[in-house]
Amino acid sequence: FALGIPRNRLILQDDISDEQRVHIEKLLTQRLSRVPLQHLLGSTGFRRIDLAVGPGVFIPRPETELVAEAAIRDLREQPIGSRIAVDLCAGSGAIAISLGMEVENSRVHAVEFSADAMPWLNRNTKSHEDALSALGSRVVVIQDDAEHVADEGRPLARLAGQVAVVVSNPPYIPDSMIPREVEVRDHEPKMALYGGEDGMNVVRGVLRTAAILLAPGGLLVIEHADVQGSDAGMRGVPGITKAMIADYEIAALTDIPAGTPVYKDVADRIDLNGLPRFTIARRV
């Protein structure tokens, strides 16, 4: 990267120019000051794709690949014509583009509110446009907030009750829990990290929108902190799973009797470190 030559040709490179040396030293200085490596490279890998990333957009994590996997597996089971998915809080487009690339003939709606993240989302979607088209898939980018994007008159209102999968990696860190890692604390967009006093402000909006969009039996996949998993009560952090999702109700849904929870089959799923990282549930 720093020398502008392919990695497999580095062994053939005996000397570097003064200009290249200065460039390398500048990159090293930035990295020593804890600028994320992905920002210096301008890209990161996620599952089978490469994504452009930089200041203003959240860097997708390896743990989120399992969140995408759960959504992908379910979307593949849908008949062609019903492979409709929505990615709320899409960020760089990692999950949305992966869905489109790994599930042929799919229609994925990538919803992002942040004006700083939108250029990255648009750029990544555009760079994968031809590959998506070859698979019969399409990713549609929408700038709106996760809580109201499906309300009457908003972009996704027409999809109410028709979506097979809603997936989200929302901001879920409580405002008081400042990350220790400098790369995260000082360089990741705060809008993508913090979810209010209890970390659940955006999560509540995601549950509301998913309840409106999902077809009966449709799948919700939502990432959360490990302490917000099934053992959250032991650590004093509000649980996202069998408390909030299993008991969630919304009066706006006419197909579900009042007082009846919207979601069923609620279950935690573990990440690469064996920690509860995301939750799945079915729309009643």
Image (cartoon, grey):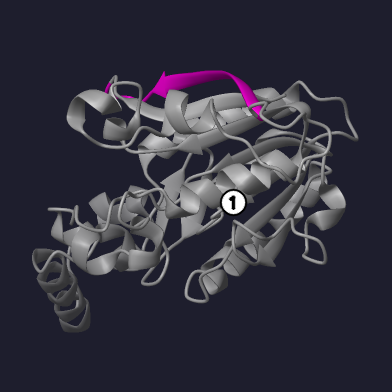
Toward which corner of the image does residue 126 lie, by quadrant? Answer: bottom right
| Residue 189 in the image, given as x and y percentages of width and height | 35, 67
Left or right: 232 in relation to 33: right
| Residue 100 in the image, given as x and y percentages of width and height | 70, 43
In which quadrant of the rendered image does the C terminus lie? top right
Residue furthest to the right in view is 81
In depth, the one of 162 and 208 nearer the eye is: 208
| Residue 204 in the image, given as x and y percentages of width and height | 51, 47
Exactly how many numbered labels are in the figure? 1
Residue furthest to the bottom in view is 19
The secondary structure type at the circle numbered 1 is strand
> Is disc 1 surrounded by few (<14), some (14 to 19) or many (20+) residues within 10 Å?
many
Of the residues shown, which amino acid type is indicated by label 1?
Leu
Q: Is residue 279 above or below residue 52?
A: above
Q: Residue at x 10, y 69 (%)?
A: 33
| Residue 130 in the image, given as x and y percentages of width and height | 75, 56
Toward which corner of the image does residue 27 lie, by quadrant? Answer: bottom left
The rendered magenta stretch, by its main secondary structure, is classed as strand
In depth, the one of 117 and 260 nearer the eye is: 260
Q: Which residues are magenta?
A: 262-273
In which quadrant of the rendered image does the N terminus lie? bottom left
Left or right: 228 in relation to 78: left
Q: Residue at x 59, y 40 (%)?
A: 167
Which residue is the site of mark 1? 88
Q: Residue at x 58, y 42 (%)?
A: 207
Left or right: 228 in relation to 279: left
Q: Is residue 18 visible?
A: yes
Q: Residue at x 46, y 43 (%)?
A: 46
Q: Residue 67 colored magenta?
A: no
Q: Is residue 151 above or below residue 21?
A: above
